[in-house]
Image (cartoon, grey):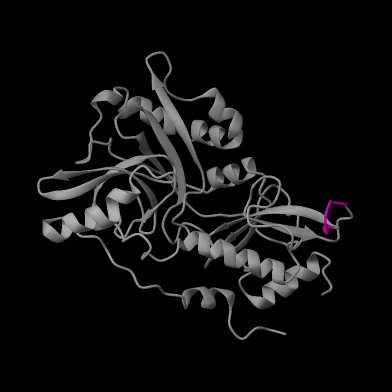
């Protein structure tokens, strides 16, 4: 039976009330005591970004390290999910507990449940439950392989992205006097294909030409080195990063479903990702001028070409099931 409401429409219907913090005055002091100080140095991400800050998008999750008054306004030192530190006004934060759910995680959890409800993903697995730690699994019953539990086909790894704002690749580069900016051995071992893309793209050459003295790099008002952006003509770095993670299927909300690798392991005719990208090189930790995070993104909303297959659509999902040998 075809569902009347698409999966994507179901997600977009959800909305949650929210409230932002105040950064100054008596009310600002009250907000700091109630909504900031109890959460300092937590091991968990406790606050959500309400307003874009530098290259951090709205909805980014943060851990708070300390709070201080700068020119009459309260600011926090915060760590993002990539380990980078920021100094920002508390007025850019939602009150803890009042921010909407992390949109990307919400999309992932609902997509996982959708895959399970159609028996494409074995029910005993959880999100990030496949062996490589990816977001979902796809059981290809046409491939006669045995797995423990209820899996009786070839198990493929899937990754979800809610749109194109999240990074599709990141790695830390370092600087020293001998090598300049370079990819370290550990990073290369963990992300070999992505490291190759960074090296052949000219990112390191650019950094070593324009930022060969990182201690004197131009900084923002928060004291961090300014983010460097470099356009890239295709999405090969993202494809390499997904291959490093052993991903076979990529699902991007609003864009569709893609194959990862030279061969479509689902045999459904999924395309590889294509489009145009952008590198963003940021100071990894405020005050550490010798390490930068090299992240790769599709270049805006038009940076990723849409797929002709979208598993958020019922008709595409049912056709996909048939290709995988699912009869129910």
Residue 20, magenta (yes or no):
no
Q: Is residue 314 left or right of residue 166?
A: right
Left or right of residue 17, residue 106 in this image:
right
Residue shown at 84% from the left, 57% from the top: 153
Which of the two residues, 263 or 92, is positioned nearer the viewer here?
92
Asked if residue 133 is positioned above or below residue 174 in the image, the reply reads: below
Q: Is residue 306 visible?
A: no
In this rendering, would 305 be left or right of 23?
A: right
What secondary structure prevails in the magenta region? loop
Q: Position of residue 155 (x, y in %)?
A: 77, 53
The quarter of the image holding the N terminus is bottom right
Horizontal arrangement in the rendering, residue 116 relative to residue 191 (left or right): right
Residue 234 at x, y percent in the picture = 51, 48
* Residue visible at 29% across and 22% down in the picture: 213
Taking 36 as reference, is 322 above or below it?
A: below
Q: How many marks?
A: 0
Determine the residue located farthest toward the top in the rendered image.
178
Tell me which segment is drawn in magenta: 146-151
x, y percent for residue 320: 74, 68
Depth check: give the residue in front, 301 or 251: 251
**Figure quadrant of residue 189:** top right
Q: 200 or 268: which is nearer to us? A: 268
Q: Quadrant of the C terminus?
A: bottom right
**Residue 74: in sight, yes or no?**
yes
Q: Give the residue drawn at x 28%, y 52%.
A: 36
Name the foreground residue: 33 vs 319.
33
Quarter of the image holding residue 202?
A: top left
| Residue 294 coordinates in the image, percent (x, y) | 44, 38
């Amino acid at each position: 039976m075809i569902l009347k409401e698409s999966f994507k429409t179901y997600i977009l219907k959800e909305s949650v009330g929210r409230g932002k913090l105040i950064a100054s005055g008596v009310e600002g002091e009250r907000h700091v005591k109630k909504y900031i100080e109890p959460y300092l140095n937590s091991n968990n991400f406790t606050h959500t970004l309400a307003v874009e800050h530098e290259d951090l998008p709205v909805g980014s999750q943060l851990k708070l390290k300390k709070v201080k008054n700068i020119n009459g306004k309260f600011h926090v030192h915060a760590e993002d999910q990539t380990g980078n530190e920021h100094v920002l006004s508390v007025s850019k934060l939602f009150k803890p507990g009042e921010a909407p759910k992390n949109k990307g995680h919400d999309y992932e959890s609902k997509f996982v449940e959708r895959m399970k409800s159609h028996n494409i993903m074995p029910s005993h697995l959880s999100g990030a439950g496949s062996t490589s730690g990816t977001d979902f699994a796809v059981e290809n019953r046409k491939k006669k392989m045995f797995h423990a539990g209820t899996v009786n086909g070839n198990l493929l790894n899937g990754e979800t992205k809610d749109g194109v704002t999240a990074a599709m690749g990141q790695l830390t580069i370092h600087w020293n006097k001998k090598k300049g900016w370079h990819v370290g051995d550990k990073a290369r071992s963990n992300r070999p294909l992505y490291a190759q893309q960074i090296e052949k793209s000219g990112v390191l050459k650019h950094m070593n030409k324009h930022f060969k003295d990182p201690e004197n790099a131009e900084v923002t008002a928060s004291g961090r080195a300014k983010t460097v952006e470099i356009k890239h003509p295709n999405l090969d770095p993202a494809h390499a990063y997904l291959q490093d993670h052993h991903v076979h299927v990529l699902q991007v909300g609003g864009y569709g479903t893609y194959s990862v690798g030279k061969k479509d392991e689902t045999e459904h005719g999924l395309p590889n990702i294509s489009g145009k990208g952008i590198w963003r090189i940021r100071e990894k930790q405020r005050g550490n001028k010798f390490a930068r995070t090299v992240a790769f993104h599709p270049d805006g909303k038009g940076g990723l070409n849409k797929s002709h297959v979208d598993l958020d659509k019922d008709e595409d999902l049912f056709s996909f099931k048939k290709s995988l040998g699912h009869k129910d």
